[in-house]
Image (tube, rainbow, N blue to C red):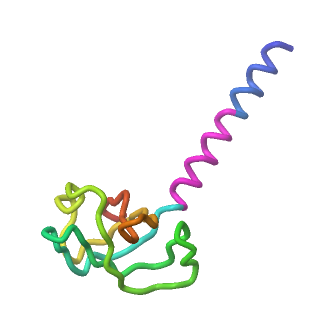
Amino acid sequence: MKTNKIVAAAFSISLAFASAVAIAQGAMANGEVKKIDEAAGKITLKHGPIKSLDMQDESMTMVFRVQDPAMFKQVKVGDKVQFEAERTSAGITITKMQKGK
């Protein structure tokens, strides 16, 4: 009986972890790098919907601030990327970015 409870608890924990990973991946938006302006700390992306900003059905090209200038070293114009963005006092800012798959 005790073994069944342990197995059930382990299953519940793994299911919760898998759900958290799926939600985190769902927050990533897809885009393409159109322009990089390191001096200004900005990047221009052609992107699809950004759920975290309530841009569910909108695809457009926008200029974003970049939270960490090291992100510029990861990408170049033409690269497909996945990113997370949030509204800050400085404007809409990329908080995480990686090359797309």
Q: Considering the image in quadrants, where does the N terminus appear?
A: top right
- Say which of 61 and 21 sits in front: 61
Image position, residue 29 (x, y; %): 45, 68
**Is 51 contained in the magenta span?**
no
Give the residue drawn at x 52%, y 61%.
27
Left or right of residue 83: residue 23: right
Q: Quadrant of the C terminus?
A: bottom left
Left or right: residue 11 versus residue 33 is right
* Circle count: 0
Along the viewing direction, whichever of 94 and 6 lies nearer the viewer: 94
Boundaries of the magenta span = 13-26
19 to 94, vertically: above or below: above
Dominant SS in magenta: helix
Of all residues shown, which one is farthest toward the front? 89
The residue lying toward the viewer, choosing from 62 and 18, is 62
**Residue at horizontal 51%, vertical 57%?**
25
Q: Quadrant of residue 54?
A: bottom right
Vertical placement of 65 versus 14: above or below? below
